[in-house]
Image (cartoon, helix red, strand yellow):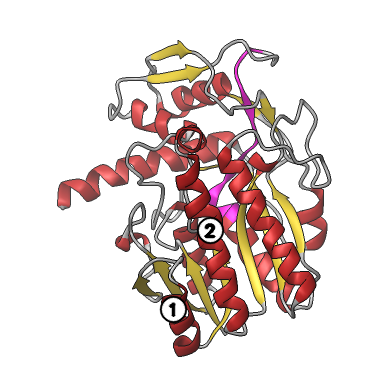
Amino acid sequence: MTVLVTGGAGYIGSHTVWDLVDAGETVIVVDDLSTGFRWAIAPEAELVSGDIGDQEFISAIIAQRGVDEIIHFAGSVVVPESVSDPLGYYLNNTVKSRALIEAALKGGVTRFVFSSTAAVYGMTGDEPVKEDAPLNPVSPYGRSKLMTEMMLSDCAAAHDFSFAALRYFNVAGSDPKGRTGQATRGATHLIKVAAEAALGKRPGVEVFGTDYPTPDGTGVRDFIHVSDLARAHLAALAYLREGGNSLIANCGYGHGFSVLQVLEAIERVGGTKLNVSNGPRRPGDPASVIADPALIRSSFDWVAEYDDLDFIVRTALSWEESLDRRNAIA
């Protein structure tokens, strides 16, 4: 079987491509390299540079490469940016996803794994959120992803087509083998930002909001290691191959850490003191978002291996150090 991975040169996509290759899969990566990196892709995978919104281009790849399945990562992912550029997010995340899905249906692709987000829930409260919770995204990013989930559900009802949409919580860390990691310039993910600050790549870390209704006043998130998340995509693909019904599942560990707890872990593991400043809340940021992962654990052959904040931080710091060496060689 041939798996087409969109956005496979990006952070989560590249980890999944490495895992697919390790599993002996034939992998075609489509990425326009606007935010991804050619070096992040496993050399055994074929990279075809292009736009997922170009139906003619995608249809040709599906036909010529004999694509059976698609894992769809490509899109824009920064919540505050989506608030300032909503139409850009609806184009990249919704309009282009629609084009991709149509090309898949016309090309006979029957299995589709989609990179969704916990942002579809909006303000969730303190308790772990289940998949049947009310969907009330507070940002264009969350709404753009929810629209794609809805399109997939409608297509599955109308065609011989099944999908798994994985709602990510907060993804962090890097490949324990050091093969790939997050390298996006100007990244906004907390652990990435704090790791850069710990290594002197940023002057410090700004905490956005210290007046949330949480134990220490800062936002609480469910941080999942990127390698556990990558394996969830392979587990979703295996589930669909075995005839599993379409489903939407949370990807998280079921417990959270506050921003201050994460910064303490960076200082503890990195052995350095961070320069921390406090700022106002960012638009679209809920106080607490924690997954209820019961569905993915019961539906897929998936068990978390790296549910440890210090390990997540250690791999993030290790990756930042390896980027320094990579840049020095380049």
Report crowding for label 2: few under 14, some 14 to 19, many 20 or more residues within 10 A (C-alpha): some
Q: Is residue 72 left or right of residue 196?
A: right
Mark 1 residue element? helix
Mark 2 residue element? helix
Q: Viewer-proximal residue, 109 or 57?
A: 57
**What amino acid is at disc 2?**
Val
Which residue lies at the image location 33% right of the left edge and 55% below the top edge? 34
Rendering coords of residue 270 (x, y %): 41, 28
Rendering coords of residue 18 (x, y %): 46, 66
Please tell me whether residue 161 belongs to the stretch shown in magenta. Answer: no
| Residue 42: quarter of image | bottom left
List the residue tagged with mark 2.
Answer: 95
Residue 38 in sight here: yes
Q: CA distance from mark 2 to mark 1?
A: 15 Å
User: In the rendered structure, which segment of residues is drawn in magenta?
Assistant: 216-229
List the residue tagged with mark 1.
Answer: 56
Q: Viewer-proximal residue, 5 or 265?
A: 5
Which residue lies at the image location 36% right of the left edge and 55% below the top edge? 36
Compare marks 2 and 1 and give the one earlier in the sequence.
Answer: 1
Taking 271 as reference, is 19 above or below it?
A: below
Q: Viewer-proximal residue, 183 or 115?
A: 115
Report crowding for label 1: few under 14, some 14 to 19, many 20 or more residues within 10 A (C-alpha): few
